[in-house]
Image (tube, rainbow, N blue to C red):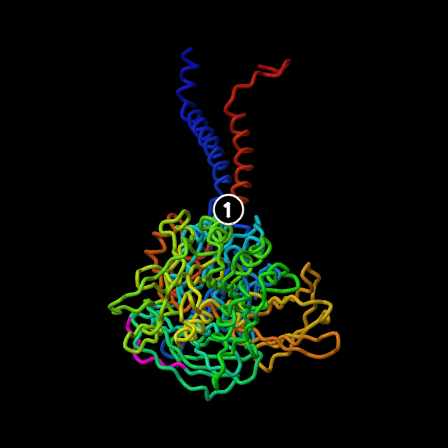
């Protein structure tokens, strides 16, 4: 026993050391398994040499037109391109494999729905990029890039990465967002956070590269449209333009140049000082002697951003504006009086061509298309067929204008039950019975009391008002607080002396509906004998007339141009000429749809006028022009900073760098995945652990062996 104790004392240290080493190896094996699952990264060049991955630099370059913001002798986009070149140049200096992808925000969603990157997974080497060399691929591409006239922000580009780049186990991704970080693009924080969270799962780092250092003043033309609904050839009409001040200081004298049909001598408009964040409105007169399409363009003097200084509008002016007058009482002159007021005789033409028909005309909309008329007047109508009511409501919902003139034939019960329908119908108010307006013996008040409503605004000056000589004898009363009044939401445009409504109007769908509670002729009134009746009817036409046939200002850069043609009239191909005369016309082939042949022109990348040349089956040509404008809201140059982004993105990890300080090499480059190295080390560790465990354990002698 003493011998055994001595032997144990002699070898106990070595035995404990082996057992401790075995324990450490087993602990290391468990830790290695955890590390492999966690996918650790080792920063710097050592990590890249040990790893087996390729670093993929994915650059989203914002080329929306706000990036054309100028400062000193450069613009923001120049800063952005320099930052992209700097990212690639520092990637070139890395010893591990590097690839590069460049996607502009305007190319994130092409017409096919697929993004169009300028560079996709290109290997970074001396042939790809080299500082100050214009013969390298990236340098050449950056040299040709300029800002688009698109307003596409980073959200669409982030979404497109899911289809553009599939996850790869052998690469790590660094995502760079090179942008001006305008408030408008980051207002929808929840959606941006979702998109960035999706990218965070696939990327080692996200680096936001800021290319602008300060908010600069900027003006933008936000609207250009005819003010009056009565816009025809041979008649002077007013155009309305709106300019918004996106700066932080009041913009003083603002000059807008006007061009009509390409004529640079169209004159100028001057706006009053525009406070920051507000809009200024100006009117100017326009006149075109010939019917058909006419082009109007306006342009501001230069400021920080040029793209939103221009606005385009196409007017499709008819020779006359057709309106429909429905005569509910052929025995009276009420409908003829309304038609005469819309197109009075005299040296100055109103541009309106009224057509008088019976109520039955409204029933057959297939042959008597209401959409061909700019407004429909129903004068002293008693009742209408159900089909006529449906057609009128469909016409108004689509943007048509309707005016009712009530008289002795009007059935209040029918109007309330079928046209008002507790506020759901076309008529703006619930009617009461016929009423008499008793004489004002002292004659101190006019029978008609106007308001600031556009139809009666010309009579606001009582000193020069024609209304003083109008006599109203009878009218239809209106039920106050009628059921459904909150749904109809009618506006009183004019009242009678006793406060009863004379003219009421409401919106119905996209259209406007007006109702006059009296007819202009005796014994109800002598209004037709007064010049104010002609003025009121012309202003009513201007107010209710449908406007969709005049112009199409809704098209913006980036949205395809669509046109549907009748295959019985036109050939299945057409040509589209872009805004620049140097552009080669593009041929577009139509596809069959239920309404006819649908043509789509997707390459709408610039603002201006696009002309489609259609060919009829008889080989004659027809031209149709569309105006395309920039999204003026992109001209809002307010920025968000790093602190605001952190607050809005709530937990999304990113680095915020200025364009001249971005350094994606070594300290900021993504680390290498070490999973493979750890896996190999784990295999060796497990083999060593088994060998050491065998040495440390007791083994009985083999049978027959010498003890």
Asked if residue 213 shows in the view, the reply is yes
Of residue 555 and residue 218, the one placed in the foreground of this image is: 555
* Label 1: how many Cα within 10 Å (few below 14, some 14–19, many 20+): many
Q: Secondary structure at mark 1?
A: loop
Q: Give coordinates of residue 162: x percent, y percent.
A: 55, 53
The residue depicted at 60 percent of the width and 82 percent of the height is 582
Residue that sits furthest to the right in the current view = 618
Image quadrant occupied by the N terminus:
top left
Instruction: Say if 510 sits above or below 354 in the image.
Output: above
The quarter of the rendered structure image containing the C terminus is: top right
The reply, left or right, for residue 620 in relation to residue 338 is right
Tell which of 352 and 622 is nearer to you.
Answer: 352
Q: Does 425 lie within the magenta span?
A: no
Residue 40 drawn above or below residue 408: above
Image location (x, y in percent) of residue 268: 40, 84
Q: Position of residue 4 (x, y in %)?
A: 44, 14
- 519 vs 38: above or below: below
Left or right, 571 with reference to 339: right
**At which x and y percent is residue 577?**
62, 77
Q: Can residue 253 be found in the magenta stretch? A: yes
Number of numbered tags placed on the structure image? 1
Chain part drawn in magenta: 249-256
- The residue lying toward the viewer, choosing from 179 and 511, is 511
Residue that sits furthest to the top in the current view: 1
Magenta stretch: helix, strand or loop mostly: loop
**Residue placed under numbered mark 1 in the picture:** 674
Between 672 and 392, the one lying in front of the other is 392
- The answer to whether 22 appears left or right of 282 in the picture is right
Q: Is residue 42 visible?
A: no
């Amino acid at each position: 026993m003493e011998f055994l104790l001595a032997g144990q004392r002699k070898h106990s240290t070595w035995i404990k050391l082996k057992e401790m080493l075995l324990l450490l190896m087993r602990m290391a094996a468990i830790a290695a398994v955890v590390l492999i699952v966690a996918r650790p990264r080792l920063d710097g060049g050592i990590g890249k040499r040990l790893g087996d991955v390729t670093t993929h630099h994915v650059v989203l370059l914002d080329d929306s037109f706000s990036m054309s913001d100028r400062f000193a002798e450069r613009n923001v986009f120049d800063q952005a391109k320099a930052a992209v070149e700097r990212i690639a140049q520092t990637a070139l200096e890395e010893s591990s494999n590097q690839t590069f992808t460049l996607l502009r925000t305007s190319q994130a969603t092409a017409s096919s729905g697929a993004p169009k990157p300028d560079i996709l997974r290109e290997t970074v080497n001396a042939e790809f990029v080299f500082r100050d060399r214009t013969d390298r691929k990236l340098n050449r591409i950056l040299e040709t890039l300029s800002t688009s006239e698109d307003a596409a922000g980073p959200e669409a580009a982030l979404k497109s990465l899911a289809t553009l780049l599939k996850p790869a186990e052998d690469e790590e991704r660094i995502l760079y967002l090179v942008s001006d970080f305008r408030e408008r693009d980051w207002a929808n924080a929840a959606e941006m956070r979702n998109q960035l969270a999706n990218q965070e799962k696939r990327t080692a780092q996200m680096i936001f590269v800021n290319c602008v250092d300060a908010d600069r003043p900027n003006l933008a033309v936000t609207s250009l449209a005819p003010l009056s609904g009565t816009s025809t050839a041979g008649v002077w009409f007013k155009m309305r333009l709106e300019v918004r001040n996106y700066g932080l200081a009041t913009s003083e004298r603002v000059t807008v140049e006007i061009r009509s049909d390409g004529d640079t001598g169209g004159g100028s408009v001057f706006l009053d000082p525009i406070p920051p964040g507000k809009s200024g409105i100006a009117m100017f007169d326009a006149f075109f002697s010939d019917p058909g399409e006419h082009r109007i363009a306006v342009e501001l003097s230069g400021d920080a951003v040029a793209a939103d200084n221009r606005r385009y509008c196409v007017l499709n002016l008819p020779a006359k504006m057709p309106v429909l007058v429905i005569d509910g009482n052929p025995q009276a002159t009420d409908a003829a009086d309304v038609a005469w007021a819309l197109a009075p005789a005299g040296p100055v033409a109103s541009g309106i061509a009224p057509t008088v028909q019976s109520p039955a005309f409204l029933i057959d909309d297939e042959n008597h298309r209401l959409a061909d008329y700019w407004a429909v007047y129903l004068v002293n109508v008693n009742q209408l067929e159900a089909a006529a009511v449906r057609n009128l409501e469909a016409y108004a919902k689509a943007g048509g204008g309707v005016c009712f003139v009530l008289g002795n034939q009007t059935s209040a019960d029918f109007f309330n039950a079928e046209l008002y329908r507790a506020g759901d119908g076309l008529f703006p108010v619930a009617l009461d019975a016929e009423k008499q307006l008793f004489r004002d013996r002292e004659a101190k008040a006019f029978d008609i009391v106007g308001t600031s409503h556009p139809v009666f605004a010309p009579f606001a000056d009582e000193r020069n008002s024609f209304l003083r000589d109008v006599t109203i004898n009878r009218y239809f009363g209106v039920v106050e607080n009628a059921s459904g009044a909150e749904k109809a939401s009618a506006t009183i445009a004019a009242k009678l002396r006793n406060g009863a409504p004379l003219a009421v109007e409401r919106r119905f769908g996209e259209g406007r509906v007006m109702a006059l509670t009296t007819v202009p002729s005796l014994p109800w009134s002598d209004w037709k004998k007064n010049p104010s009746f002609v003025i009121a009817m012309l202003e009513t036409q201007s107010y209710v007339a449908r406007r969709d046939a005049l112009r199409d200002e809704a098209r913006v850069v980036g949205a395809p141009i669509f046109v549907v043609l009748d295959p019985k009239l036109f050939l299945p191909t057409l040509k589209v000429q872009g805004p620049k005369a140097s552009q080669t016309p593009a041929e577009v082939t139509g596809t069959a749809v239920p309404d006819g042949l649908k043509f789509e022109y997707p390459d709408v990348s610039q603002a201006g006028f696009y002309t489609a040349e259609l060919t009829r089956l008889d080989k004659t040509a027809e031209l149709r022009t569309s105006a395309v404008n920039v999204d003026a809201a992109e001209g809002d140059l307010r920025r968000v900073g790093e602190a605001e982004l952190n607050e809005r993105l709530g937990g999304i990890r990113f680095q915020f760098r200025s364009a001249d300080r971005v350094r994606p090499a070594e300290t900021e480059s993504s680390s290498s995945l070490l999973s493979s190295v750890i896996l190999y080390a784990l295999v060796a560790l497990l083999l060593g652990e088994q060998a050491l465990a065998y040495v440390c354990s007791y083994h009985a002698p083999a049978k027959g062996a010498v003890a």
